[in-house]
Image: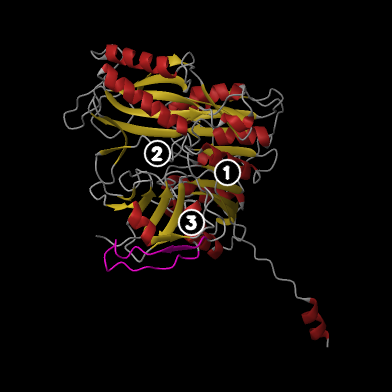
Amino acid sequence: MAAVKGILLQYSHSDMLIPATFSSSPKRLFLFTFSSNHLEKRCSRQDFRPKISAKEATATCKISPNLKRRTVSRKRSTLDLNLKRNLSKSEKFEDLPENTGEDFKAALQCEHFQRCSGCTREWGLDKPLILEEVKNFFDDHDVHDFTFTSEKLWEWRCRAKLAVRGTSETPQIGLYEEGTHNVVDIPSCRAHHPQINSAIGILKEAIKKLNIQPYDEVAGIGDLRYVQMAVSTYDTSLPHVDRYRNGKVQVALVWNSRNENSANAEKLTLLYKFLWTRGGPKSDNHIIHSIWSNFQTSSSNIIFGGRWRHLVGERDFWERFGGVDICMSPGSFAQANTQAFTSMLYKLCKYVKRGSAVVELYAGVGIIGLCLAANRKCRSVKCIEINKESKLPFEKSLARLPESLDSSISWHCADVSKVPIHWLEGSDVIVVDPPRKGLDNSIIDALQIASLRGQGAIQTPRRVEKRPWILRAQKTTNTASKTNFDEIASWPDTLIYVSCGWTSFKQDCQALLSNKAWHIKSAHAFNFFPGTDSIEVLAIFKCGERIKLKKKKSAEKRIARRK
């Protein structure tokens, strides 16, 4: 038997968990559950479940009387265990480490852990392992105002893309097991918003009852390939404190056919009607916001195809970020942790001066740009995004901004990696929110050139724009400012980098700092993905080299010098 890393003691009548630690290998975790008949030792692997009688449990475990509360006390609990005769002789007792209590309060406690690839950490969800490295990195770059913010540790995920496999009798809806294409069923995921788990339960019931065939990757046959669940907490009829808990789920079914006229279209109709009957507004448990279908027949790993259809429910999916109403389509990119993202938005806004000209690259539906326009009264905001599906949601969000807002706001469908210097000219602030791979090399080069031009190190060439793709991109959605601002050839002095990939951020950061074109002024981190080693970073860069201020001499040194 492998050595034990941690043990949880759980009383079935009070659901109280108590941690204990043994000398061990780092991957092994057991759960002991006390009940009236036996003490069951539940291992993370299903093939090992030895049981200990209640009499043995009483004889081998002595629990301090202070542990009567349902939740673990903030003070370090004392626990005296003696399970030597029930464990192998090689397993020796160890005292609890000093931080066990704090880590335990942020424990995942998920039955799918280790098999599911979604979470990689079970302890200390509020402190990612990478956090210390991030702190040291910014400290080495003279950034001493670094902060770390953590919101919800459980039930934080409001957007999930899940594979549908198995059979119609035993459907499996979840994530792939690490390094394989074997789907792990996760009906009780601790990271999911509770409404997502409820919607998955209804979907499973529908698959069984209607004989919907889950997709078979090897044979390339089946009806339902994937499902995306997205929770909207935008409900102004409820008090603000109740909106998150009572969110509604937008269900997007990825159907294995070319369009809605395919042979299995009748099954799709039966499926969405069943879901709407069981979870729609006329049901006893109204949790479904709307249902969409996406049609995909490719054998690649790409989840969504290019064809979407709205089936039933509200067409527009609204969420509120940074005090602004944002519309999103099922094909739009959006952050899964909405509460942590909102905290980051408020922090980001503080670094943009009122009346600035802002350019947002990798803009998506323009959430950051619209929030800056509304909160910082920017004179102009340009959002550049390659996904054309984001244009319509942007237009709907734009229509909800106050009419009194005096700002020129535009959205452009373009590949920012092609001639990016064009978008940077005339701006004061650049916001980049790239994918996990980081910035394209062409954008890094353009940012360095823009900084040097702003410092006057190199001259700005003047020419009339003739490139057709740029001219086409300029003919986009635009709300012109009521005020006529003079067009001045200016260059950005502030770069705001939002990163979800720490490794790529470090590489991009070193490239930006290499020729002293930029320096880091401030940095903050956010716990967007509790249970993983990922971290979201908000870094503020300023144009030019950091100016090191001379320290003022103390009064004692000045007096000593006079003497």
Residue visible at 50% across and 52% down in the picture? 105
Residue 517 is left or right of residue 58, and the answer is: right
Along the polypeptide, which appears first: circle 3 or circle 1? 3
Q: Earlier in the sequence, mark 2 or mark 1?
A: 2
Looking at the image, residue 383 lies above or below residue 285: below
Q: Secondary structure at mark 3?
A: helix
> Given the current orientation, which residue lies at the most extreme front position?
55
Name the secondary structure under disc 2. loop
Report, in whole angstroms, how far the alpha carbon at label 2 lies from the one at label 1. Answer: 25 Å
Instruction: Give the percent coordinates (x, y) of residue 360.
Output: 54, 38
Residue denoted by label 2? 189
- 58 or 361: nearer the eye? 58
Secondary element type, mark 1: helix
Estimate how packed mark 3 is, as few (under 14), some (14 to 19) or many (20 or more) residues with alpha carbons within 10 Å: some
- Residue at image mark 1: 344
Kindly report which numbered mark, 2 or 1, lies closer to the viewer in this rendering. Answer: 2
Residue 102 spot, x, y in % from top left: 52, 57
User: In the figure, 22 relative to 224: above or below?
Assistant: below
Find the distance from the CA under tag 3 to the CA under tag 1: 24 Å
Residue 514 in view here: no
Residue at the image position 67 percent from the left and 27 percent from the top: 481
Tell me if residue 78 is in the magenta stretch: yes
Residue placed under numbered mark 3 in the picture? 103
Query: Can residue 257 be seen by looking at this rendering?
Result: yes
Which of the two residues, 202 or 431, is positioned nearer the viewer here?
Answer: 202
The kind of residue on which mark 1 rests is Met
Based on the picture, tell me whether residue 269 belongs to the magenta stretch: no
Say which label, 2 or 3, has the lower sequence index: 3
Region of the chain picked out in magenta, as a range: 77-98
Q: Amino acid at mark 3?
A: Asp
Mark 1 Cα-neighbour bin, 10 Å: few <14, some 14–19, many ≥20: many
Q: Mark 3 near mark 1, Cβ–Cβ under 8 Å?
A: no
